[in-house]
């Protein structure tokens, strides 16, 4: 009888582009079905072993290892947390569901795909710890803040995407080998481009073979960037990757850039060692999720999240330099206007305190005219009903702070963007012939009739690997 292997192979982050020197590393046999944040991969698990990197058995254990690692990271921080009720006890994982450069979370599970580039290279979206952790991040954020799912607000889905990327970076930092490589490779200046900042190098490469301006030049998205906040209502719905658009993956890079700057600043206050980096990664992840739990779903969502992170850091880490590092990160990317980095509670916020004890308010419906979208009647969308807790705003690129648009204009801008990008599915019986619909394999939203009214609702967080398609 052969002994059962105690190790499998996994990627520390990503296989990289085809010419990359990355090699898989031995990992303990993971069990993604165990607490915390359990998941279950469809199908039968191949016998644990160190398989050939071209095989489906190899990819199975890559995904299982990444799932275990990201669940351990967020599980230790979040404690007793349950998936969104429609997910059930275990997050379903569907590896290699079909042909596409894509992956998505749909409130049931995570779905991964494969596709082939014109030169015949086949890439699988499950064959990357970066991508698996990003998708898992969507599910975690949905578990702790389900109100973000349907918010008609351009900054909210962008934050969801950023949370996925931040999840990948934070999970990667739980591996000592990655921490040491990144510290050495950046000279301890973590805001520099590195394997930490570069998300999904292989999928980025695959997409560039047919859509060279759809993703960054060295990966899917690089958090070592200089993007500065602009009100997303003023941005085009799509743009080449070296420019900012209101498309959620594009706009997410502003927040991810501030996150990496902040992480680098926090790390620079330590002794610069691997253990200190691990501590910083846990401290920052904890601040982030505690802030997200408390932040009201308002139009200026980025600045409110940042203000909550700062307020919590002031309470918990008043003396170690974290607050200055976070302030600098948020200002450098315009998430907070320069005059708004000393966080002050608004009148409403004073009544609520920094971290409210009460559960967040559900979103409320708002009626928008369906005429601009070719629909014959109003459409109900969902918007946040809570007031801002902090009297802060993001920066205006020309100086000072942005004014911020009223809620109805924010919601209408969000819906218009979805239609311009062809992301809305409309039930056949609701079509009038005047709507502009695009046949895409993944529609992030749909318009359905619910209780007599037309309602816009989200179907998935699509990971946009076909950006530009
Ligand atoms: Zn995503």
Image (spheres, rainbow, N blue to C red):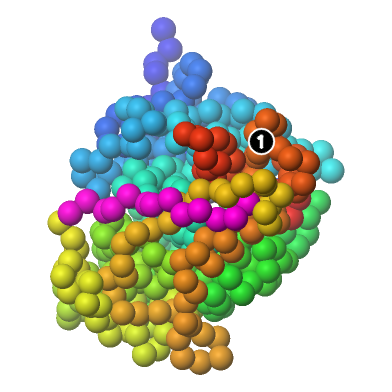
Q: Is residue 314 above or below residue 20?
A: below
Left or right side of 207 for 418: left
**Residue 306: x %, y % from top left:** 35, 71
Magenta run includes residue 334: no
Instruction: Count residues near mark 1 (Cα–Cα under 10 Å), then give few for <14, some for 14-19, many for 20+.
Output: few
Work out whether residue 182 can be spotted.
Answer: yes
Which corner quadrant of the image does residue 258 belong to?
bottom left
**Residue 32: x %, y % from top left:** 37, 31
Give the residue at the far right of this rendering. Answer: 118
**Residue 43: x %, y % from top left:** 50, 18
Residue occupying the point 38% across, 52% down:
364
Query: Along the line of sight, which residue is nearer the eye, 179 or 90?
Result: 90
Residue occupying the point 46% across, 48% down:
150
Q: Is residue 172 above or below residue 392?
A: above
Left or right side of 293 for 399: right
Prevailing SS of the magenta stretch: loop
Which corner quadrant of the image does residue 299 belong to?
bottom left
Give the residue at the far top of this rendering. Answer: 1
Q: Is residue 184 above or below residue 428?
A: below
Position of the N terminus, as image quadrant, is: top left
Q: Secondary structure at mark 1?
A: helix
Residue occupying the point 22% across, 72% down:
349
Left or right side of 375 for 352: left
Question: What stretch of residues is rendered in magenta?
Answer: 358-370
Work out whether residue 199 can be spotted.
Answer: no
Residue occupying the point 67% across, 54% down:
371
**Residue 148: x %, y % from top left:** 41, 52
Magenta run includes residue 365: yes
Query: Along the line of sight, which residue is nearer the eye, 346 or 16?
Result: 346
Residue picked out by circle 1: 430
């Amino acid at each position: 009888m052969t002994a059962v292997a105690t190790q499998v192979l996994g990627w520390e982050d990503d296989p990289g582009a085809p010419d990359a020197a990355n090699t898989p590393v031995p990992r303990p046999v993971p069990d993604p079905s165990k607490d915390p944040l359990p998941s279950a991969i469809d199908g039968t698990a191949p016998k644990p072993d160190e398989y050939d990197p071209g095989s489906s058995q190899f990819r199975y254990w890559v995904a299982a290892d990444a799932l275990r690692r990201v669940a351990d990271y967020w599980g230790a921080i979040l404690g007793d947390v349950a998936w969104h009720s429609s997910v059930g006890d275990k997050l379903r994982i569907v590896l290699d569901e079909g042909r596409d450069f894509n992956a998505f979370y749909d409130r049931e599970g995570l779905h991964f795909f494969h596709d082939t580039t014109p030169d015949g290279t086949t890439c699988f979206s499950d064959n990357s710890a970066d991508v698996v952790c990003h998708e898992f991040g969507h599910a975690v954020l949905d578990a702790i803040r389900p109100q973000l799912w349907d918010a008609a607000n351009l900054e909210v889905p962008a934050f969801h995407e950023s949370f996925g990327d931040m999840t990948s970076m934070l999970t990667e930092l739980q591996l000592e080998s990655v921490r040491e490589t990144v510290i050495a490779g950046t000279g301890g200046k973590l805001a520099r481009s590195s394997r930490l900042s570069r998300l999904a190098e292989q999928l980025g490469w695959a997409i560039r073979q047919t859509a060279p301006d759809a993703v960054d030049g060295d990966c899917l998205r690089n958090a070592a960037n200089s993007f500065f906040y602009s009100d997303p209502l003023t941005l085009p719905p799509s743009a080449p990757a070296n420019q900012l658009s209101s498309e959620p993956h594009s706009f997410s890079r502003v927040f991810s850039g501030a996150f990496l700057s902040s992480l680098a600043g926090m790390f620079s206050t330590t002794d610069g060692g691997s253990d200190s980096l691990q501590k910083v990664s846990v401290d920052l992840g904890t601040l982030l999720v505690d802030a997200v739990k408390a932040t009201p779903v308002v139009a200026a969502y980025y600045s409110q999240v940042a203000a909550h992170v700062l307020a919590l850091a002031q309470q918990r880490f008043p003396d170690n330099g974290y607050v200055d590092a976070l302030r600098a990160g948020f200002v450098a990317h315009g998430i907070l206007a320069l005059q708004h980095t000393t966080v002050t509670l608004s009148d409403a916020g004073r009544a609520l305190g920094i971290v409210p004890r009460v559960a967040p308010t559900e979103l409320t419906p708002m009626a928008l005219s369906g005429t601009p979208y070719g629909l014959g009647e109003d459409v109900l969308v969902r918007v946040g009903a809570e007031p801002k807790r902090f009297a802060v705003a993001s920066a205006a690129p020309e100086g000072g702070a942005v004014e911020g648009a009223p809620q109805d204009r924010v919601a209408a801008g969000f819906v218009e963007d979805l239609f311009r990008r062809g992301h809305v599915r409309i039930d056949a019986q609701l079509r009038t012939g005047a709507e502009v619909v695009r046949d895409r394999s993944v529609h992030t939203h749909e318009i359905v009739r619910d209780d007599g009214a037309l309602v816009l609702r989200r179907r998935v967080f699509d990971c946009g690997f076909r950006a530009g398609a």
